[in-house]
Amino acid sequence: MNFNDFVKKNSLEFSDSDKKIYNFLSQRPNHIPSLTMQKMADGAGTSIASIQRFCKKLGYSGFQEFKFAFKNYLLQNQSNDISNKSQYLNEYAKIITQFANQDKKDINNLISTIKNSPQIFSFGVFYSSIPARFLSMALIDNGYRSHYADNYVTGSHLLNSYTPKDSFIYFSISADDEYDFNRHFKDEFEQYKNTYLITFNPNSPIKKAFRNIILLPGREFILKSSIDPQSLFCLLVEYLVNNLNN
């Protein structure tokens, strides 16, 4: 809270007494609504008359109008602070709503494939390893034979036991890891149909290698996030697991 923003000190000529009052108030702006004129005068080392003149110099009829205006100023700025702090959550909520309302045809197809797969492999690197691991663990808990990998070398080794009826689920926010993907996965993927890329990037350079693409909403939100928000992937995992028994 900058008291100067309220009083617009730079546009006023303050006397020595005014400066004492300003310095006293600027150090404790949140206390102003509860201060009496006498307490303000005592704290600033001035007189009640000086407080009255200070308030009038700011454009108010007196002390009470000054306090009333400052209370409104505090409330307005507190409201703005709350709004700014909740902006991220509001945007996050919008993405959840978009996910809830989007066509689930591709996602339901994945659920059906999982149910009919002898083995399910899930893969993700770095942050994307989180949803890959969560999915694998949840599938195991539900009686499925599932494996996951969090790096390309381990992932390529998993493909050695992959069969045409198995499923491979690849999590990646941007899905732009073309070099590593081509080096470790591309040749194997071309011969299987139950391969799924789950991403936020509609222009992924590796999507042609997959038979199935699940594009999630929220790409603009992702680009503004300070970290890879894998919580949105985990939302999808939650949906998948909860609908396996339907």
Image: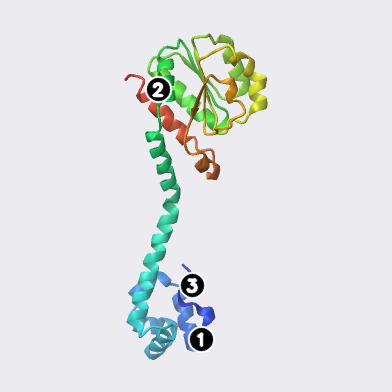
Is 211 placed left or right of 140 in the picture?
A: right
First of labels 2, 3 by sequence position = 3
Q: Is residue 169 above or below residue 68?
A: above
The answer for how far apart the CA atoms under marks 3 and 1 are is: 16 Å
Taking the spot 40% from the left edge, 17% from the top edge, the residue there is 112
Which of 81/195 is in front? 195
The residue identified by callout 1 is 14
Q: Residue furthest bottom?
A: 49
SS at mark 3?
Answer: helix
The answer for how far apart the CA atoms under marks 2 and 3 are is: 55 Å
- Tell me where residue 242 sits by quadrant: top left
Residue 44, position as x, y percentages in the image: 44, 82
The answer for how far apart the CA atoms under marks 2 and 1 are is: 71 Å
Q: Is residue 62 above or below residue 119?
A: below
Classify 10 Å Cα crowding around label 2: few (below 14), some (14-19), many (20 and above).
some
Tell me which amino acid carries mark 3. Asp
Taking the spot 42% from the left edge, 17% from the top edge, the residue there is 140
Q: Is residue 1 above or below residue 35?
A: above
- Tell me where residue 75 sits by quadrant: bottom left
Which image quadrant: the C terminus? top left
The residue identified by callout 2 is 108
